């Protein structure tokens, strides 16, 4: 088991709210087994899975397909997102109690779920229950449109990528946002030895000055989330390059390196990868003495090209980082230790299909109190309300 030494610290099990698992439909890129193994290796005990699969998670039937696959193959805990389509605004709310939220793709990216028509966006805002999050992939002008919708419909919105958010937060809108490690630790100038195709992601990698702005505005970033979006080396090398980068195994080591460099604190990490994800998505907290990770803050290592992810490459390969996950405990079991995943496929549980006991001490305040919006229904008895 875990030997104690002065450079080992314990953190709560991390929650990554933005993962593209690829199953069903593209298991040559990733599947529930490989994806959740990669998550555990990265210190992540719960992932929230995006709905842009084949078929996409846009109906009750497709929910059942993914839920079955995930329940039998996942090695860590998980939640599923429903996807908004041009045709499901009145029907998709039927699965709202079983999912993390409704994902809306408002810009072109790697999905068949892009919503072009603003009237469709409005139908989703009207029909989706207020107490379950709406999460948007919005870039540029669509961000402003979504802010207007959030204000008109008086509901919270989570932005999967950030820009323009400070002004809206300053105005008191109940919006939250996440940032991906590749936007914090890679810029467009990065020379990937596999070729510049391997930098392609939506939204694009930032310029140095945009990246500096992210770091300077760390206080408004609610979550870190990988946006783990694996595509194979062959696909990334092809003429039609799909956007997306893997991130599950390297997010925490990159963030721990930033701690050693004095650019972040451990509390910054725990807030954005545990406390806030629980609050925003209403994830029932697990007792911290049963679900936690141990990291060695002093171990320096070089990120390899290969890991547990099936895609076979890593955008940070060759980079030296300080801080390594030594072991992961999930619901009392040793799930990962020294490079090996010990729990079987099927050990992972859906965090949204059952009521878990509360972890005392975490029934804290909601993220944005007193904004005058109507009180939402609590998703789980005894769980703090994410938004007023
Ligand atoms: O780069 C991206 N890849 N951005 C997205 O929004 C989708 C993702 C994917 O699924 O590959
Ligand atoms: Zn996105
Ligand atoms: Zn994504
Ligand atoms: Zn906790």
Image (tube, rainbow, N blue to C red):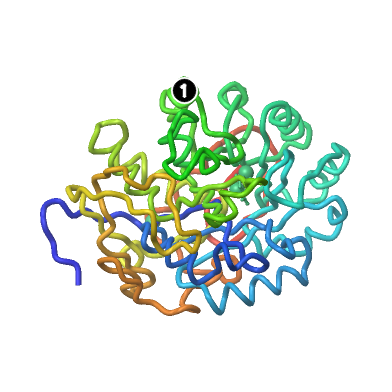
Q: Residue at x 66, y 68 (%)?
A: 24
Q: State the quadrant of the N terminus.
A: bottom left
Residue 38, can we see it?
yes
Q: Residue at x 56, y 56 (%)?
A: 234
Count of numbered marks: 1
Tell me the residue that label 1 is attached to. 213
Residue 103 percent coordinates (x, y): 69, 50
Residue at the extreme left: 5
Looking at the image, residue 238 sits to the left or right of residue 284; the answer is: right
Residue 239 percent coordinates (x, y): 65, 46
Q: Residue at x 86, y 43 (%)?
A: 120
Q: Quadrant of residue 261?
A: top left
Residue 388, can we see it?
no
Q: State the quadrant of the C terminus.
A: top right
Q: Quadrant of residue 193?
A: top left
Q: Quadrant of residue 219?
A: top left
Looking at the image, residue 309 sits to the left or right of residue 53; the answer is: left
């Amino acid at each position: 088991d875990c030997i104690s030494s002065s450079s080992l610290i314990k953190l709560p099990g991390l929650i990554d709210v933005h993962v593209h698992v690829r199953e069903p439909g593209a298991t040559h890129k990733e599947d529930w087994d490989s994806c959740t193994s990669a998550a555990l290796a990265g210190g992540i005990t719960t992932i929230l899975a995006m709905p842009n699969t084949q078929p996409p998670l846009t109906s009750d039937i497709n929910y059942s397909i993914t839920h079955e696959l995930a329940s039998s193959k996942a090695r860590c805990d998980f939640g599923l997102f429903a996807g908004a389509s041009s045709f499901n605004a009145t029907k998709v709310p039927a699965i709202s109690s079983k999912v993390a939220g409704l994902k809306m793709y408002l810009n072109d990216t790697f999905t068949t779920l892009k919503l072009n028509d603003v009237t469709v966006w409005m139908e989703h805002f009207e029909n989706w229950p207020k107490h379950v999050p709406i999460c948007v992939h919005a870039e540029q002008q669509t961000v402003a449109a979504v802010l207007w919708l959030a204000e008109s419909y008086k509901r919270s919105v989570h932005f999967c990528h950030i820009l323009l958010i400070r002004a809206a937060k300053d105005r008191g809108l109940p919006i939250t946002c996440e940032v991906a490690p590749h936007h914090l630790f890679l810029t467009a100038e990065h020379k990937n030895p596999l070729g510049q195709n391997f930098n392609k992601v939506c939204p694009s990698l930032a310029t140095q000055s945009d990246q500096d702005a992210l770091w300077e505005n760390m206080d408004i970033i609610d979550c870190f989330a990988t946006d783990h979006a694996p595509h194979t080396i062959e696909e990334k090398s092809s003429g039609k390059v799909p956007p997306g980068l893997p991130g599950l195994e390297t997010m925490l080591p990159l963030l721990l390196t930033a701690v050693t460099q004095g650019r972040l604190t451990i509390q910054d990490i725990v807030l954005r990868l545990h406390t806030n994800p629980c609050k925003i998505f209403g994830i029932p907290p697990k007792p911290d003495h049963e679900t936690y990770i141990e990291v060695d803050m002093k171990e320096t290592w070089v990120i390899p090209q290969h890991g547990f992810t099936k895609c076979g490459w890593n955008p940070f390969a060759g980079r030296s980082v300080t801080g390594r996950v030594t072991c992961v405990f999930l619901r009392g079991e040793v799930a990962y230790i020294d490079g090996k995943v010990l729990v079987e496929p099927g050990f992972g549980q859906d965090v949204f299909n059952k009521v878990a006991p509360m972890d005392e001490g975490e029934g804290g305040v909601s993220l944005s109190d007193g904004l005058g919006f109507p009180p939402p229904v609590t998703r789980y008895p005894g769980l703090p309300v994410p938004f007023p």
